[in-house]
Image: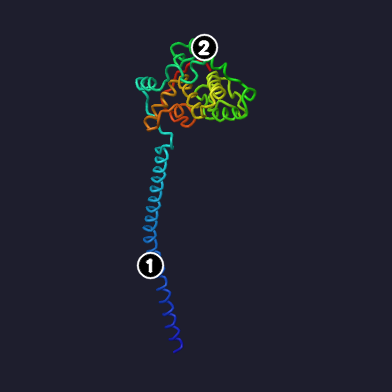
């Protein structure tokens, strides 16, 4: 009887071992068929993330390129006819009302087609400029001159956006700048009733005459954006570089 029980126990163990082997084989058969579609699904999901990420990057790049900077928008192409028309509108003409007769000068003296006449006028205005105005202006007058000089410059010629140093001296060797300085100093000394804004406007008229094409291109952009064409808006640093991107090769009157 014990021998028979051992045989039964051995048979049971053998049967259990056989079942374990079958289970292992089933897992071995099932695993590959399960893993393969799992990896395919994961690859598809990852590919979708890559495509979505690239789309978002491209959208952000396009948005950054196409969005204009505030106050400086892409300037339209300028035709000669448009430029000539706007210059005829903005270039000052005749004798300056306040000081023209006093100095014997006229806006018409600055003629791009008559460089000799224009240069003679510039020399006359340069003579009004004291390179060291602290020697010829009072403290209050010097303060006014520096304030005005920091609002306008000669960026179209020498590249500077101001016409004074910290103490009122000359920041560059450009005669256009010296001529504008001369007008400002003369009006501060001889016409104290004029405000800084009025003097800046007057200086802006001469700058417009010196750089008719640059200021003309700027006027077209300002006009397109609905900005008033005052000489302060045209010539001061208030809207500096707003005309960038317009036609190059602009003419200037007088030497630098």
| Quarter assignment of residue 23 | bottom left
User: Which label sits on residue 193?
Assistant: none
Say which residue appears at 59% left-offset and 24% top-offset.
171
Q: Quadrant of the N terminus?
A: bottom left
State left or right for residue 92 relative to residue 128.
left
Which residue lies most toward the front here?
A: 193
Foreground label between 1 and 2: 2
Judging depth in this view, the residue of 11 and 108 nearest the camera is 108
Residue 20 position within the rendered picture, expressed as x and y whole percent measured from the top left: 42, 72
User: Mark 1 — residue?
Assistant: 26
Q: Secondary structure at mark 1?
A: helix
Label 2: few (<14), some or many (≥20) within 10 Å? some
Q: Secondary structure at mark 2?
A: helix
Say which residue appears at 44% left-offset and 80% top-offset.
10
User: Mark 2 — residue?
Assistant: 120
The total number of labels drawn is 2
Residue 221 position within the rendered picture, expressed as x and y whole percent measured from the top left: 39, 29
Say which residue appears at 44% left-offset and 30% top-offset.
242
| Quarter assignment of residue 187 | top right
Judging depth in this view, the residue of 148 and 223 nearest the camera is 148
Judging depth in this view, the residue of 110 and 137 nearest the camera is 137
In the rendered view, tell whether residue 47 sits above or below residue 218. Answer: below
Residue 230 position within the rendered picture, expressed as x and y whole percent measured from the top left: 43, 28
Q: In terms of sequence position, does the residue under pointer 1 or pointer 2 come before the other?
A: 1
Q: Are marks 1 and 2 in contact (CB under 8 Å)?
A: no
């Amino acid at each position: 009887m014990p021998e028979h029980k051992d045989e039964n126990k051995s048979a049971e163990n053998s049967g259990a071992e056989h079942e374990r082997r079958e289970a292992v084989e089933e897992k071995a058969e099932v695993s590959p068929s399960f893993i393969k579609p799992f990896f395919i699904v994961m690859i598809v999901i990852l590919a979708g993330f890559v495509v979505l990420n690239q789309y978002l990057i491209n959208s952000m790049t396009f948005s950054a390129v196409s969005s204009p900077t505030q106050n400086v928008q892409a300037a339209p192409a300028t035709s000669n006819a448009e430029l000539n028309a706007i210059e005829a509108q903005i270039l000052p003409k005749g004798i300056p009302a306040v000081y023209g007769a006093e100095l014997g000068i006229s806006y018409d003296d600055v003629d791009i087609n008559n460089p000799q006449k224009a240069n003679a006028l510039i020399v006359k205005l340069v003579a009004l400029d004291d390179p060291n105005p602290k020697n010829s202006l009072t403290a209050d007058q010097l303060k006014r001159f520096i304030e005005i000089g920091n609002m306008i410059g000669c960026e179209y010629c020498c590249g500077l956006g101001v016409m004074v140093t910290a103490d009122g001296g000359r920041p560059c060797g450009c005669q256009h700048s010296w001529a504008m300085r001369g007008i400002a100093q003369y009006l501060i000394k001889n016409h104290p009733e004029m405000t800084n804004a009025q003097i800046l406007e007057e200086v802006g008229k001469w700058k417009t005459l010196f750089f008719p094409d640059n200021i003309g291109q700027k006027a077209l952009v300002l006009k397109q954006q609905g900005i008033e064409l005052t000489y302060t808006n045209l010539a001061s640093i208030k809207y500096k570089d707003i005309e960038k991107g317009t036609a190059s090769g602009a003419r200037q009157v007088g030497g630098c």
